[in-house]
Image: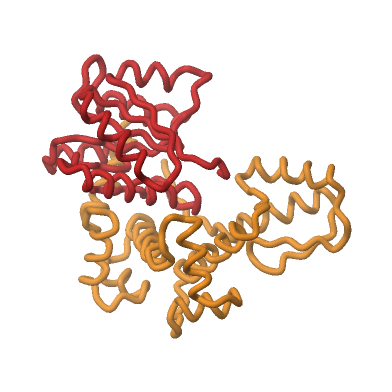
Chain colours: A orange, B red
Amino acid sequence: MKIYLKFDFNTICRKILEEKLNEKGLKYRIPSFGEVEFLEQVSKEEMKALTNNLTEYGIEIIENQKTALVQKIKDTIVDMVFSEKDINVKASVYLAEKLNHSYGYLSNLFSEVTYTSIENFIIMQKIEHAKQLIVNDKLTLTEIAYRLSYSSVAHLSTQFKNTTGITPSQFQKIITKRRELANKL
Amino acid sequence: MNKEYMHIILADDDEDDRLFFTDAFDELKINTKVQTYNDGAALMDYLNDEDSILPEILFLDLNMPKKNGIECLQEIKSNPKFSNIAVAIYSTSSSEEHIEETFVSGANIYIKKPSDFNMLKKVLSDVVTINWQYQTSGLNKDNFLLRM
């Protein structure tokens, strides 16, 4: 028997983070995803132990301010795409308002650190979400296009092909065949 | 993840192709460390050695002596130790059947070798940039399929 799972990464990360912080008996608050504010002094030893504990889960403490802001941009985009919020404003306005910086600044910083642009990153995340929906939820492409706010199926298909080099149906076929192969072994 | 370079390996028996490949990376702005092998057996020896540093991305030519690209791919995909390595097939063939077969066997990327050096630089830069996003943005690697 085999089951397929869908994860809510925000919830998982938050749970792990809270567990680890509680274990250490630290007083803290989590103002937003990817941020922890300590309410009292944390010693160097405590910080080191916490760092080690979190590394095990692939959680890394970001030292550099620029990297931290880029991570916030990414988190905001991922949240925007995966929550399928019906955002009426443009992504550029949304990011600028949420992160309190001009879009020009965010956009330059993002390209400098990640080697790609915010626009490309958004497209990539949307296509990733489309892939997940194709694989897990067995939605039709029309339904997926609608959920991800594409103007048409053709628009989604073209962007999918431009981003991955293959069509959505080729993608689905390959993943299905991979699963069949894995089940045989 | 704050390592300042990306570790890349190419296995290809053609000397010119290996040279073009390393030259192309020298000219990209992403910091990379490129290692090359001229057949599949030498590559697998390196990967299986416990002291070896595993690459973030591995480029495999399909036709190689001793062990071909498909054999390497299958070996890599059946060993959980290598689950973090993205595998790119780097081949002259563009047969649809071939391409689908390598994807089904677990390849993440399929690149038809470009004949022009500038094209090669562009393709490799795109591949490495996209792979970088998969490494740093928590994307699901099982769904990572890219054809260039």
Quadrant of the rendered image containing residue B10: top left
Q: What x and y, as percent, mark residue A184?
A: 30, 33
Rendered view: B87 above or below B30: above
Which residue shows up at 88% across the image and 56% down it? A41
Rendered view: B37 above or below A60: above
Rendered view: B77 above or below B66: below
Q: What x and y, as percent, mark residue B111?
A: 23, 42
Who is closer to the viewer here, A83 or B69? B69
Who is closer to the viewer here, A119 or A79? A119
Which residue shows up at 27% across the image and 24% down it? B71
One can see residue A137 in this view: no
Who is closer to the viewer here, B125 or A132? B125
Q: How many marks?
A: 0
- In the visual, does A75 lie left or right of A170? right
- In the visual, does A97 lie left or right of A17? left
- In the visual, does B40 lie left or right of A36? left
**Residue closest to the far left:** B95
Which residue shows up at 20% across the image and 71% down it? A154
Q: What x and y, as percent, mark residue B140?
A: 43, 50
Which residue shows up at 45% across the image and 69% down it? A81
One can see residue A18 in this view: yes
Q: What x and y, as percent, mark residue A45?
A: 84, 42
Please state, as top left, top right, bottom left or bottom right, where the N terminus of chain B lies in the image. Answer: top right
